Image: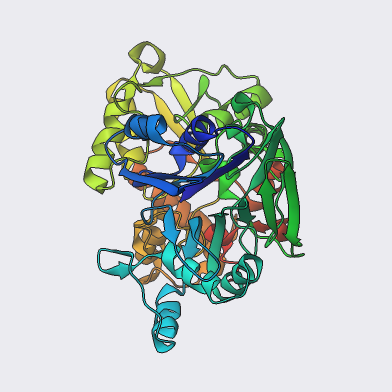
Amino acid sequence: MGGVFGIVSKDDCVSELFYGTDYHSHLGTRRGGMAVMNPHGIQRSIHNIENNYFRTKFEADVARFKGRSGIGAISDTDPQPLVIGSHLGTFGIVTVGKIGNLQELVQNAYARRRVFTDTSGGAITPTEMVAELICEADSFAEGILKAQAEICGSCSLLLLTDKGVYAARDRLGRTPLAIGRREGAVAVSSESCAFPNLGFHSEHFLGPGEVVFITAEGWEQRVAPGTKMQICAFLWVYYGYPASDYEGINVEAARNACGAALARRDDTPVDCVAGIPDSGIGHAIGYANEKKIPYRRPFVKYTPTWPRSFMPQNQQLRDLVAKMKLIPVRKLIEGRRLLFCEDSIVRGTQLQDTIRVLYAYGAREVHMRPACPTLIFPCEFINFSTSRSTLDLAGCRAIQELEGAADRNLERYARAGSAENLAMVEIIRKRLHLTTLRYQRLEDLVAAIGLPKEKLCTHCWDGSSTC
């Protein structure tokens, strides 16, 4: 996925930019970057962060950078920020999202005799394509509107100019942006959890398609928000950091509510409840509190040398890292009936290894309660994962086994409690060697988040959202 952070200050802002960008490290693992504006132009630095922390790669840059405005990004797509020279002036740009029609936009640009210079692996990068579309207009605001109108998918972005920072949320608001303020500075961030320790308080959540211009004195709206929103519900289930709010709704509180909803529909007798670290913990606490069942930690996460769940990119190594990070506690496993809450089951391979360890350590029963419905539609809108083809999904593999094709009768399989849905879940349960497996109902997930369903993107579960 990825995340962005920007700041404009009356004083030097480099330290705040560094730490604010670092607070997005849970959102991506490939590249990190920062750019600052000063009287000499734009200073920029981009580093590969696949094998190390963002902050260890950028400490030297903090010492040499100077500026009162800047933007930063954690990206799983392309190296950012880009620095662009154009008739609008020199500007920096960072983006987050997914451009589903990228190749079409590139071919259209070639037809207009446009030139691209920043390629990654021989391909045009999404961020340069967005910059190209912006530069075809007569102003930054008009250019952002043009880009948003032509992009299918999502693209939230920050533009660093010599006058301030433009912030634009994607047309349907699939990814969030929040504005924070403190005396003498204004910041904008994908994650509001970046604000408190830097002295900012959250002041405004950008609406879908809204464009604002930020200076050290404040911010002003350049494009009003649209009326239709499709924010990704997975932000509360999995991606978002527990301390962050989106649309004024806290992530940890929503996860607690998800767990409580799972508990209200469950009468399985168990000895304790646990969460698969880290994102399953909030759901498990909500379940345990609702049921008045002890919450325990039969797995503890070892973080000093394995700090991040996304890294590395290679799936085989990721599976090994996931195993290395979770250390079982035999005293809390042996002879017990364990119920685990998990944010979701995507492929199920890492979870299968976890369950195998539980039984090897003497678990009597292992029950699993994912906090969202079965994933059967690959994400088309926010780059949820670079490897999520249909048959990567545990639900689709089960449908393939039942139907002979992974894309047949998906509406029936998405309907909780239907014969098809129950058959699919049973295949997943057997494959994972679980005692029981019960998924969250979509209506319960929506209620736990607290927004109307029409304002949420639930495509992964029911295929309902469109570009």
Residue furthest out toward the bottom: 111
The answer to whether residue 203 is left or right of residue 29 is right
The answer to whether residue 320 is left or right of residue 307 is left
For the residue pair 182 and 308, the one nearer the viewer reads as 182
**Rendered residue at 37%/10% (across/down):** 331
For the residue pair 3 and 253, the one nearer the viewer reads as 3
Task: Name which quarter of the figure residue 249 lies in.
Answer: top right
Looking at the image, what colour scheme do you see?
A: rainbow
Residue furthest out toward the top: 331
For the residue pair 80 and 299, the one nearer the viewer reads as 80
Please count the marks in the image: 0
Is the residue 169 above or below the residue 130 in the image?
above
Is the residue 358 above or below the residue 76 in the image?
above
For the residue pair 239 and 389, the one nearer the viewer reads as 239
Location of residue 393 in the rendering, given as x and y in whole percent from the top left corner: 39, 56
Q: Taking the image as drawn, is residue 370 in sight?
A: yes
Residue furthest out toward the front: 39
**Rendered residue at 69%/42% (across/down):** 448
Location of residue 172 in the rendering, given as x and y in whole percent from the top left corner: 65, 63
Location of residue 146 in the rendering, given as x and y in whole percent from the top left corner: 60, 74
**Rendered residue at 40%/70% (across/down):** 403
Q: Taking the image as drawn, is residue 152 in sight?
A: no
Location of residue 1 in the rendering, given as x and y in whole percent from the top left corner: 46, 51
Which quarter of the figure is the C terminus placed in? bottom right
Task: Name which quarter of the figure residue 284 lies in.
Answer: top right
The answer to whether residue 195 is left or right of residue 115 is right
The answer to whether residue 32 is left or right of residue 442 is left
